[in-house]
Image (spheres, grey):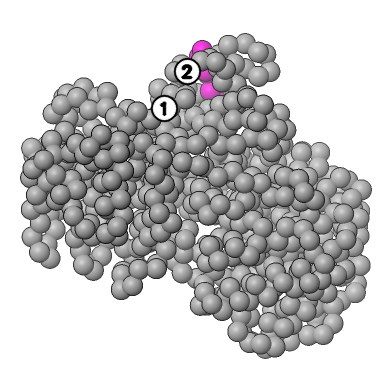
Amino acid sequence: MRRHFAMVNTSGRPVNWLGANFWSRSGGPRMWSRYDSELVRTELRTLRRHGLTVTRSFFFWPDFMPEPERVDENCVANYADFLQAHLEIGMTTIPTFLVGHMSGENFDPPWRGGRDLYTDVWMVDRQAWFVERMTERFAEHPAVTGWLISNEMPIYGGHASEEAVSSWARMMVRAVRAAGGRQPVSIGDGAWGVEVTGVDNGFSVRELGGMTDFLGPHVYRMEDDQIRQHYAAAFVCEMVSTLGHPVVLEEFGLSSDFASAEHSAHYYRQALYHSLLAGATGWLAWNNTDFDNLFEQDPYRHHPFELHFGLTTVDGEPKPQLEEMAEFSRVLSEIDVANCRRRDARTALVVPEYLEGRVPITDDQDNRFSFSVLRQAYVGAKLADVPVGLTRERDGLDGDCSLYVLPSTKQLTAPAGYRLEELARDGAVVYVSYCHGVTPFQRGPWFAHLNRMFGVEHQLRYGLVDPVEHDEVELTLTTEFGGLSRGTTLRFAVAGNEHSRSRLPVRPAEAEVVATDQDGSPALLCRRVGQGWVVLCTYPLEHMADLTPGVNPDATVTLYEALATLAGVERPVVTGDPSVSADVLDHGDGRSFVFVASHSDLPVTVKPEVAGRLVDPRTSTTVETLELAAHEVRVLLLEG
């Protein structure tokens, strides 16, 4: 199964944008009317010294277009100087056209008058006019490396129908092209569409990907589990990358008001490396500087935490986040990332078609919850050192994997169920952990042939659930399974609401009971199908873990290791410690780079198992034991 790793192309060559969203501390969004040329150069030099090569810049719409048929020439002249500064310092920038939303407030041009941004014909024409005028001015400037249409338009313009949004976006992209803009272009919406989040805001990631050159997630998640938090951006990038387009992590970061200096560095480090391994090939941090001098100015006045998202302080001093960006820049250069690729995966997480909201008369909440269980399963697979990708049910399941994982699954279309059984017959392992869903809507299994597929006879009672009364579920193996010995007990915290805190009662028919719970009921069952296996877990393990604070790493890691063994999945590097993960990028010249990441707050020592040997690329010495500091990431060569 191919794991996408597409690059943005500029001037016919692949690039890896590494930089920051940029507002000068001279005025934040008002920088163009208070422009300080020397300060801008000072700020850019600081970024460049730390390995950053690109900024994302913004045409603050109220200032740039004060009247419906006029562009402010003073702002344009200041932006021209801004581009010249990039050229002098050896950087490029990605201009963003329609910037009404910024840092917690929507700023309208004074003449908008409440008109709809997507469907009011005159208003759409004015937006396209502005996009054309700015593109005409700067399309030939060598400092312009790409274009973005908007900044988080779902917040500024609101949600709308997919037809309206896609038509609006297409007209804006055409305006760029009509005015001579040949650089890569994207929308700037944050990739928050239904294909990623399960929430339909009108900004279909599929549709927008078809008319643009890259997709740009914006990720600022709040979690209750540190490892899930560190993988948050990576999982979103992985979801977006399944659509086959280059992925640029267009916005990520944190306010220093929300994290200490030490933990800010940890978050940046983990987000950068894990998103790289999830298919991102560009990164733009939010943002370049703090704004303590602007505390009386909106939006910082009423969103004071927005004052401190910077890579530098208001005095221009680098913060730990910028040092992490500098180290990441060095690593990208050392591995020559533009000529790397991700290894194909033999393990697939199945993204249900229901997540994308295309199935009629379904419950939105049940559709959406698969995002969170997939994310938790993704974390479990990563901690098990299982190379994993995502396959979308809507696109047809990839048929070249050895292991298919359907975590806490209530809904599956009828053809997909039969297709999975066919894949098992051809030699794959198909694992399903069951879930009743999180609402009362048609609560029960949406499987076309559950009994036959899993070799069981379910014992459900119509309209009722079989609640889990214990606070912890114990799964004890009754036979050897995937390298785990008989008698092994796996323990899982129980969570869920009145619908999902429940199990699937079954009796074995053709299936063998592999594990029972503490009440002696079947909990894990295997059915031989042709050359492969179908494995059923009667508890929603991943859903329960997703609702449990601080749960990772949990026993799902051990279960996934066993499933990978049963399926014969190759794990090129096995750390032997669930708090340490490993993954590989391959270079076109034959080198393989191993990324080993600690998720522990404490120093940890591991002796990885590898097929070959690990080598320190700086000293060329063999590495058998790794001593990792808290949340450290090491890059090694895999030889042999």
Which quarter of the rendered picture does the C terminus lie within?
Answer: top right
| Quadrant assignment, res 329 | top right
Q: Are marks 2 and 1 in contact (CB under 8 Å)?
A: yes
Above or below, 330 relative to 355: above
Task: Report the residue at 63% width, 25% height from top.
Answer: 590
Looking at the image, the residue that sits furthest to the top is 621
The type of residue carrying mark 1 is Glu
- Quarter location, residue 449: bottom left
Q: Which residues are magenta?
A: 624-630
Which residue does the image show at 39% across and 68% down from the upper left? 358
Rendering coords of residue 473 (x, y %): 19, 40
Q: Nearer the viewer, residue 203 or 418?
A: 418
Q: Nearer the viewer, residue 381 or 439?
A: 381
Please indicate whether residue 113 sits to the left or right of residue 457 in the image. Answer: right
SS category of the residue bearing label 1: loop
Q: Which residue is mark 2?
A: 611
Q: Position of residue 38 (x, y in %)?
A: 91, 53
Residue 323 in sight from this viewpoint: no
Is 626 a magenta residue?
yes
Whether residue 204 is visible, yes or no, is yes
Q: State left or right for residue 43 relative to residue 245.
A: right
Residue behind mark 1: 570
> Which residue is depicted at the point 66% across and 46% down?
7
